[in-house]
Image: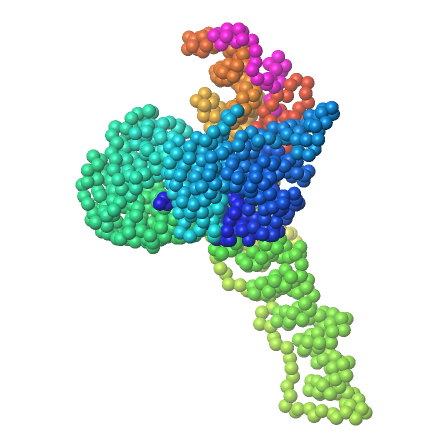
Amino acid sequence: MDKMLTKFESKSNRVKGLSFHPVRPWILSSLHNGQIQLWDYRMGTCIDKYEEHDGPVRGIDFHKVQPLFVSGGDDYKVKVWDYKLRRCLFTLLGHLDYIRTVQFHGEYPWIVSASDDQTIRIWNWQSRNCISVLTGHNHYVMCASFHPKEDLIVSASLDQTVRVWDTTGLRKKTVRGPPSQVDDGNVVSRVNNELFGGNDALVKYVLEGHERGVNWAAFHPTLPLVVSGADDRQVKLWRMNETKAWEVDTMRGHTNNVSCVVFHPKQELIISNSEDRSIRVWDISKRLVVQTFRRDVDRFWILSAHPEQNLLAAGHDSGMIIFKLERERPAYDVINNKCYYVKDRFLRLYDYSSSRDVPLLSLRRTTSTTTPGIGGGPKTLIYNIYNKAENNILILSDAEGGNYELLTFTDTIGSDSQDIKRGFGLSAVFVARDRFVVLEKHTRYLLIKSFQNETVKRISPPVNNIDNIFCGGISGRILLRTDDRVVLYDTLSRKIISELQVPRIKYVIWNKDYSYIALLSKHQLVIANKQLEQVCSINETVRLKGGSWDPNKLIFIYTTLNHIKYALSNGDHGILRGLDIPIYLTKINNNNLYSIDREGKICIIEIDITEALFKLALENKNYSEVMHMVRHSRLCGQAILNYLQEKGYPEVALHFVNDNKTKFKLALACGNIQIALSVANEIGDEAWKQLGIEALRQGNHEVVEMSYQKTKDFERLSFLYLITGNTEKLRKMLKIAEMRNDVMSRYHNALYLGDAEERVKVLESTNNLSLAYLAASTHGLNNDADRIKEYLESGNIPVPEVNINATLLQPPTPIYKSENWPLLAVGKSSLLDLTNTGASSSVSKVVDDDADIDAAATGENGWDDDDGLLDDEEDKKKKAPIANGATKSGKGWDEDDDLDLSDDESAPTSPHNGSNSSSSGQSFAAPSAGVSPTASWVSDTSLTSVHLAAGSVETGLNLLNRQVAAVNTSLLKSGAISLFVGSSCYLPGLPLVPANRSFIFSNNTTTTTKAKPLPALTLKIPPLLEMLKQAYKSFTSAQFQECKDLLETILHTIPLTYAPTRTESNDLKELIDVSREYITAVRVKAAITSAGDDITRGLELAAYFTHCNLQPSHLLLALKTAMANAFKNKNFINAASFARRLLELPDISTERHAETRSKAQKVLQKCEQQGRNEYKIDYDEMNPFSLDCSTLKPIYKGSQSVKCSYCSSNYTPEYKGKLCVTCSLCVVGVETVGLATPARK
């Protein structure tokens, strides 16, 4: 008996009907107890249950497009359900007995149902009416189904026949217009139509051949074949043509009634199940059983095949099972920058560096002779990592109980293998340059073999129950797998190095330097080091499919059935993105993920691993990188916040939060009272209570006071004033209590103040005369005591006896009366330091930072950091007066050395300073401070570069906004920092004295010139010209992304570039125009590549490409490409136009372009003969146009357009107010004065 590849199994009552959802990983099962269950077989969970039928539900089916399914049961009802609304929409009544099957039509709003009332009914589920009744069977109709493409229905009945019905007439009548008119003169015809239903559906064929009742019949999805199964234990195959149908063959093997039989949707196979508790797979061409699956007790009743995937489902007495007939995982291995894999009986090579995918070697001689679709193909491919001289590959297969093939070959396309060695074994793996190990099937011995397939050494199994072996990462080592552990074994010393308890692993993946290994089992991922010592373990609820290590970071990316995930060595893991279909990872390159799917196609998926990199940096305590990612990435979500809190970094989490409640909680967690205070007003009283508790814990009684005032917690507020010794406010609290008529609060405040007289008044006002008398007597208030005593005696109230030893009750004296309590000085954490001084990082780390528009608008990645940097410089100026050229007293360094520069005004001074002013009648007047160089730079210039060099970021950016409507100024950050740093230098001073800042000027600053001093500016035109030359070279060599990056750098540098002469100013304008044209050209070229199968769009873009203002040599390439595309796609008119323009170029007549010239002439001649266009494109070469840089479509002359204020890119008016896609710097459609340069001034 064959082993079934089970994907999902459920336990329930007897399953009588099954239906796969065409898109989602869902399956419906209808049960004998009347319940309908909706399962997610990928996750293994029951999504919903439906219970409205009375009795067994035998038929179930999903609609192909709508969120509907239909069911039919023994209660004679057909019910249509909406699984989104989770209820039955309506019920169709008409059958008079049990309903066996129901099915939606693939295109029309029809449902077909088969019943024990010997009829087949077709329903319109939109109008909710029965539109046809098919009669002809004379026993129970066990099933009925539509043909997937033609107007046919097949039905099977216990009358031992299979009938094929033609529904063409019904389609014409109900779907494609009104029915044909019946001749009024033919009375007999009209009466027959009314009595017997007319000829809407006719019996086309009656297939007779079964000896007992037929339980099931089904169409082939593409071929004119029908398969049927019956109680005579036989499966019959029938063929049809336009005129007849006949039996092709009978397949025997079942030992009881055949319950259901279907065609495999992708392979030439028939699958049948039976009450003999077996599922059998038949080869259509051989008419033989090729696989058999059995259950011990349960009988099978129903089969269903997924329309798109290689999945089958079978229902039995105790539930259902979803299974596959063969593994779909391709055999592949990745080494360095190459992926070797098997597809269509070829060994293929995919080169990641060049994206080259070529067949290397035909494997037709090495493939198994088993039936396609049931396994036996290559299972595993292993490349020899130890042999650098040649290519060796082991291909493993399960055919014939397990075999291997050793191939040695070159990377030449279409080459034959130099030698193929075959053998049998459960598994094999390379252990040395010219050795491999084979796990023997029966004895489980380890056979060390040479490349001549000769056994060199035979090793007895070091542990029991070895069933697979894997690469050990080091020459001579292998991994041995058992049911519950993995053993690292050295074949040279024949010793076990280490063991690891892990459930049955399926795949082993080493990282680039073989220092870490990922062990993947069905639902568990274990990461270990090269000594097989476990680092972490991660459990998943769905199956793991594969994975790959990041070559630069210790991050493992892996896939499950429905997700791409990441794992770190500390056990942290998360989801990167979802998946529609399973894929198998091969390589990771930055944010690009290379994978191979079940069809053997190499796919590239873009992912964002910022979250993984962030957690890795936090784990490695790389705090500078952490804060860089905080400022420049878009990390967000509750998961990140929870993670940072769990790891003890709530202060970092504060950077991700915009929600006030979350920010408040995080601020309290990290003890940041100021942030908590700023958001407490917007939250409410509960926040003030929590803030008061935290502030009291820190001794910040000013915030505590505010919190108690906001919440009107008068008792706590009074006690706070008591312990802080604030008697003035305590008296105010006493007055407030008196106004509130709060007796207890009034008494407490009097007690806190030590005001005995007030306490006596409170007691007396509350008629506590005895207590009032005692209080007055004890505290020496004799007048009050005598007065109260008279009241007591007049009221016949006993006068209490005063204790002569009583002592005065006074409030405690506060120990500390400062504004806030002192706190222990604790050094700031590394993260907090980086948060506050992140802008002072080195230029090398900031130059490559590119912030997005949103971040620049909020100031997170914008110029706020630069403001902080400039503030630091101001602090330095205050600490080192020489930088400004004046001391605090207003004297420069050229003054006398005997000046006293002390800040203490009461200090004695020398008589030379005129300290004896009373005798002389004169006072000292300090001179006014001079103007700092930076203030002089900024005072009278409109050059953005000068403002940035002076550190005046805000004014500089405002100037740029007014001149060219610049908004995304974060792109200028590296240039701005370069200007600021390059305008000054620092000179070392005396020991323990800060370095002195000295400014660098670009012009003469002597007294003989009237020109105002300007700073030396680092950004000039020559480097931009060199960059443009490099961009030209990149464009010529088709390195378009590199070309675009260089041109964008030029555009982002020009606003900060110093051009003192008119010639240089004109050069800048020309650079802007050239950069704009080439960036547009590169974007058009990329759009041509992305157009793919859209031939019309590709031709349009190729035509537009030729109208970019390029260098003649580059225009030649553009015209050559457009001519070739137009000619290949038979747009001969356009091709002729491009050929003429090509021949008109000045350089085309040179000798080196002779071949191009000849080809253009031939194309022109051929096109003039044809004189037509196969595709109509939006291109008129006679009408001048400019290209819309957002949509890459023409804006013809006379049409309205708007331009970018800076680079002059053209757009349609709808794009006004948006960010220019060419320069990514300025807003489109804003009228400005233009970029200011010294020459213009």
Give x and y (percent) for residue 818. 60, 66
Give x and y (percent) for residue 910. 55, 54
Identify which residue is drawn at 25% across, 42% down.
438
Image quadrant in which you'd find residue 806: bottom right
Identify which residue is drawn at 58% across, 44% down.
116
Quick one: 869 or 154, which is closer to the camera? Answer: 154
Residue bounds of the magenta highlight: 1161-1188
Identify which residue is drawn at 36% across, 44% down.
2
Image quadrant in which you'd find residue 956: top right
Quick one: 590 or 6, which is closer to the camera? Answer: 6
Work out whether residue 95 can be spotted.
yes
Q: Is 486 on the left-hand or right-hand side of 666?
A: left
Identify which residue is drawn at 41% across, 37% down.
251
| Position of the N terminus by quadrant | top left
Work out whether residue 575 can be spotted.
no
Extreme residue in the front direction: 188
| Position of the C terminus by quadrant | top right
Is residue 29 magenta-colored? Answer: no
Give x and y (percent) for residue 809. 65, 82
Quick one: 31 or 225, which is closer to the camera? Answer: 225
11 vs 313: above or below = below
Is residue 1173 magenta-colored? Answer: yes
Extreme residue in the left direction: 456
